[in-house]
Amino acid sequence: MSFLFGGINIVDKKIINCLNCNIEVVTNNGKREKKYCSRKCYLEFKKQKFITKNCKICNKEFTIPESQSQKYSTCSKECSKTYQMQLKENRKSGTYFKCKYCGKEYYVTKSISEHKTKKTKFCSMICRNKWESEFKRGKNHHNFGLKFSKEKCKKMSITTVKLYESGIYNRQTLPQKIINEILYKNNINYKK
């Protein structure tokens, strides 16, 4: 039953069962529906979705929401500070390598130097690019001597043309852009 009280609509009361203890609770039928009989029941219910982890510093057990299990590794702010300092120290314990192009020594963090696939050989992208332009030419290039049959070349060119026509390759070359701009400026309609 609803009625106006001082210009405000009083909403019907509703009876629900607490999600934790299943006791009947009388609640207002407002925007936010009540689901628990008390804060205690709410917290108990939420604990069911919590997990227990061991602190990486003091090894003390602590409970956190399952959704944040990847985010937290420590039980307190003090342990978190200590853990962050340890991580910072580990990052500093990298090694020095000599650049394959310029010979300059450069520092690499421990995580990258011990990585299985990331092998560092150059101090910068500039040195890497210069080295590749000098040493990956001709016989030293990985594609050198790779020959395609006439049929393979024809298939590749037909496939490329089809990709451009279908719109998958919609990038234009610089000459195409220049010609299209000239056509546009001179009000010449051209359909591709």
Image: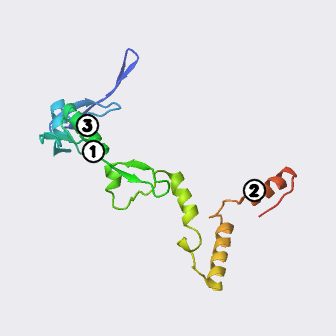
Q: Is residue 120 above or below residue 91?
A: below
Residue 147 quadrant: bottom right
Task: Say which residue appears at 56% left-offset and 57% top-offset.
Answer: 130
Image spot of residue 52 (x, y percent): 15, 44
- Sequence-wise first label, 1 or 3: 3
Numbered circle sitting on residue 85: 3
Which residue matches tag 2?
Answer: 177
- In terms of secondary structure, where does tag 3 sit? helix
Q: Answer yes or no: do the residues labelled 3 and 2 have beta carbons within 8 Å?
A: no
Specify whether 79 is left or right of 8: left
Numbered circle sitting on residue 90: 1
Foreground: disc 1 or disc 2: 1
Which quarter shows the N terminus? top left
Amino acid tagged 1? Asn
Task: Say which residue appears at 69% left-offset and 68% top-offset.
Answer: 165
- In terms of secondary structure, where does tag 1 sit? helix
Q: Nearer the viewer, residue 34 or 176?
A: 176
